[in-house]
Image (cartoon, rainbow, N blue to C red):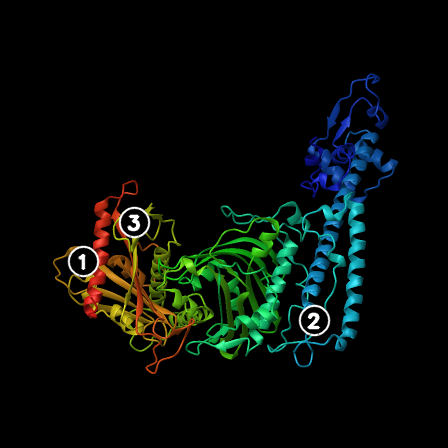
């Protein structure tokens, strides 16, 4: 039947099946008055039994002009009398009976559309009430005193409990009323639709929690999400019900989780994060150098029930807390954390690949992240092949608790997976972790960061186990330090003022372009070491077992040369302090002792850009001072990005074309500059003063006498992507790594 399209109804895409009517009623209601029977067939004629039809029936289709005039008449009067039908039929050369049938069908369709719209509104209200019930249940699990913030005594709160029980009963009655109305319109029970409240939830027992904590007016999660939430499968409006929002595709990813279970887990994780941030001693105690705190696991086990199930027997717990002041306002930081592309850009040395699998809920308020709940898959990394990448699938929940106070919490979905399917094998899981951000004057923010993970320590090399236990590898100290360094760099680079010691010849726009290129070099270097930025294929050569070799085929996308790219990574221990080794590797005067690109001579620094108060955070552009007879050398420059904080240091560099760098220095686009990065990652070994993972600060300000040095090279071994990798290329790369490391060892006399 094509009459619906001819009538041009506003609801032409509505799904008639959802109304739960019989097939015959659907056929009648979807049939337009544009199709009428010729020969004076009446409604009775259409129902004549088979074999008794007295005449052949033919359908008549209205012209576009007739439909247009009928629509206009319907808008003025949907119930015309006999006289109006005769006049309209005479004007359109239609019989009065045809006009009558058209108006009847049009009214039927309009009624169907209105019923569907009302049903969508009722379903939305039901979802809101369901969220409020979940929020209330989660808020009532841990009673808190409203005066002191401590554990409440039930005798003190019986009045509040009574009022809340009355309110919850009212909500249940309201929900039941909506279910009855929805059942009337839908023709089937509301519980059979996806996303509705699971059976038994409305009658679940209540526990009470009232009070406040130490973050101003910030309470535990005792209120529902903002009204008008937009749920993942289009449960917020009729438009999203008809056209569900597409989600990014993930390979081997099952996102068919119960939405209500995900939301309950998110609320529980948020409550735990707030309590962990507020409580001090004896739950937390100062760790190795005073920059953070470590969790008292015994006290934690007594005070907090398992949020995502019991810890696997072979896992080790790592839990740290750190507090710092960051040069970014609260809303900007929240937006960075909730946008995965900006999040991985801010923490490129910690976060590898990441993807938003699904948006469980989002605020209806434009630009607000309050109540946003996402399902994310990410890889966390330490820059060494000796530490496996941590792959985690977790919920990220954001909530505003007061004016200028926000909290963002992450938690693995292991518990939900165990309830519906076998838990995915992995080397770690993420307990409630995240940060609480509070606005400070002058655009700064106070950040309390908590990292709580359980991992399989057997997969980590012995070199790195003390470092990981100390919290510098994946702990809160590293997240805070990286955030402070990146925000300071952003503020300095975007400022119009040129710091003392910087090259004044570069314009502010040129400084920003160079900084973007340097950031890309460091990010690609980290991805090459941990095999997270591109898809790498491991290479088994049978030689140089301490060197990890990988390859990939580059097709010449913007920003990288085409051909076969070989990545080589090796980690060694050196009896040299972290700071001393870092200063040696970033110094252009000593570069000739290890860098083959220097051709045995010192480098000349032609551009220097500071990224913060620490001299180690800087960008440098070098030119070799070797003989000018080498034309290729004269056309190449070395761009180096140096980063350092309490958790470690990175020196990443790449050879870039002189002509392309001239464009970048003048403020041009740096995204098309092709390079292959190399560099070093340095961390303190944490061996000398380790005591059950806790380190004592030395008198000289250091925390260790040795360092773990990771060297990473990415080299183009063939300019043809279809070429085959040869053993000669592998031997050349291995020889280059050995020569570089030998030069460093010789410089420190530690052969």
Q: Secondary structure at mark 1?
A: helix
**In x, y percent, where is residue 621?**
26, 66
* Residue 720 shows up from this direction: yes
Split into 4 quadrants, where in the image is the C terminus?
bottom left
Check the image and name the residue furthest to the right: 82
Residue that numbered label 2 is attached to: 209
Q: Secondary structure at mark 2?
A: loop
**In x, y percent, where is residue 393?**
52, 55
Q: Nearer the viewer, mark 3 or mark 2?
A: 2
Q: Is residue 414 left or right of residue 578?
A: right
**In x, y percent, where is residue 157?**
75, 75
Q: Earlier in the sequence, mark 1 or mark 2?
A: 2
Q: Earlier in the sequence, mark 3 or mark 2?
A: 2
Q: Residues within 10 Å of mark 3 (few under 14, many from 20)?
A: many
Q: Is residue 109 left or right of residue 428?
A: right
Residue that numbered label 3 is attached to: 565
Residue that numbered label 1 is attached to: 633
Give the CA separation, mark 1 to mark 2.
Answer: 70 Å
Give the CA separation, mark 3 to mark 1.
Answer: 21 Å
Q: Earlier in the sequence, mark 3 or mark 1?
A: 3
């Amino acid at each position: 039947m094509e009459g619906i399209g001819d009538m041009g109804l506003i609801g032409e895409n509505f799904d008639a099946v959802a109304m739960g009517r019989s097939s015959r009623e659907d056929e009648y209601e979807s049939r337009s008055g544009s199709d009428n029977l010729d020969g004076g067939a009446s409604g009775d004629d259409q129902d004549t039994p088979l074999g008794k039809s007295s005449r052949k029936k033919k359908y008549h289709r209205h012209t576009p002009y007739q439909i247009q005039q009928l629509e206009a008449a319907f808008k003025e009067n949907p119930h015309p009398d006999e006289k109006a039908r005769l006049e309209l039929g005479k004007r359109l050369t239609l019989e009065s009976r045809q006009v009558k049938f058209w108006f009847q069908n049009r009214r039927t369709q309009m009624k169907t559309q209105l019923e569907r719209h009302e049903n969508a509104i009722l379903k939305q209200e039901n979802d809101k009430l369901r969220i409020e019930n979940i929020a209330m249940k989660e808020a009532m699990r841990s009673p808190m005193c409203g005066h002191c913030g401590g554990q409440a005594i039930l005798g003190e709160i019986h009045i509040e409990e009574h009022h809340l029980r009355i309110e919850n009963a009212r909500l249940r009655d309201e929900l039941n009323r909506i279910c009855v109305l929805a059942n009337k319109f839908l023709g089937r029970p509301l519980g059979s639709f996806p996303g509705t409240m699971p059976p038994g939830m409305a009658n679940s027992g209540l526990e009470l929690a009232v009070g406040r904590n130490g973050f101003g007016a910030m309470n535990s999660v005792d209120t529902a999400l903002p009204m008008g939430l937009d749920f993942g499968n289009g449960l917020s409006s009729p438009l999203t019900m008809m056209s569900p929002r597409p989600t990014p595709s993930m390979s081997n990813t099952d996102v068919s989780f119960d939405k209500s279970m995900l939301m309950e887990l998110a609320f529980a994780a948020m409550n735990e994060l707030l309590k962990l941030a507020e409580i001090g001693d004896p739950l937390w105690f100062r760790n190795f150098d005073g920059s953070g705190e470590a969790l008292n696991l015994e006290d934690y086990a007594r005070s907090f029930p398992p949020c995502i199930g019991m810890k696997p027997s072979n896992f080790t717990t790592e839990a740290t807390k750190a507090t710092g002041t960051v040069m970014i306002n609260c809303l900007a930081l929240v937006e960075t954390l909730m946008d995965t592309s900006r999040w991985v850009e801010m923490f490129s040395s910690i976060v590898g690949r990441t993807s938003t699998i699904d948006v469980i809920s989002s605020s209806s308020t434009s630009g607000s992240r309050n109540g946003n709940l996402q399902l994310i898959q990410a890889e966390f990394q330490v820059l060494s092949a000796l530490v496996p990448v941590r792959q985690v699938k977790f919920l990220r929940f954001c909530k505003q608790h007061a004016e200028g106070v926000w909290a963002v919490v992450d938690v693995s979905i292991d518990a939900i997976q165990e309830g519906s399917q076998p838990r995915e094998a992995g080397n770690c899981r993420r307990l409630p972790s995240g940060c609480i951000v509070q606005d400070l004057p002058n655009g700064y923010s106070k950040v309390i960061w908590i990292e709580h993970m359980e991992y399989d320590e057997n997969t980590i090399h012995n070199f790195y186990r003390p470092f990981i236990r100390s919290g510098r590898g994946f702990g809160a100290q590293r997240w805070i330090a990286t955030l402070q360094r990146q925000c300071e760099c952003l503020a300095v680079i975007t400022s119009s003022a040129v710091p003392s010691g910087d090259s004044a010849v570069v314009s502010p726009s040129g400084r920003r372009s160079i900084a973007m290129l340097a950031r890309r070099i460091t990010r690609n270097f980290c991805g090459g070491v941990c095999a997270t930025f591109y898809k790498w294929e491991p290479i088994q050569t049978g030689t140089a077992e301490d060197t990890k070799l990988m390859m990939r085929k580059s097709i010449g996308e913007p920003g990288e040369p085409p051909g076969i790219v070989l990545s080589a990574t090796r980690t060694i221990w050196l009896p040299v302090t972290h700071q001393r080794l870092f200063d040696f590797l970033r110094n252009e005067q000593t570069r000739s002792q290890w860098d083959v690109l220097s051709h045995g001579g010192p480098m000349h620094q032609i551009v220097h850009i500071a990224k913060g108060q620490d001299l180690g955070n800087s960008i440098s552009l070098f030119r070799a001072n070797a003989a000018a007879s080498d034309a290729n050398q004269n056309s190449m420059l070395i761009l180096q990005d140096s980063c350092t904080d309490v958790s470690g240091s990175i020196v990443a560099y790449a050879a870039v074309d002189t002509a392309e760098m001239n464009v970048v220095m003048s403020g041009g686009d740096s995204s098309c500059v092709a390079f292959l990065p190399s560099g070093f990652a340095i961390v303190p070994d944490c061996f000398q003063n380790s005591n059950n993972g806790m380190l004592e600060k030395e008198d000289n300000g250091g925390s260790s006498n040795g360092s773990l040095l990771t060297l990473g090279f990415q080299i183009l071994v063939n300019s043809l992507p279809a070429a085959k990798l040869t053993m000669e290329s592998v031997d050349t790369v291995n020889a280059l790594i050995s020569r570089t490391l030998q030069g460093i060892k010789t410089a420190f006399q530690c052969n």
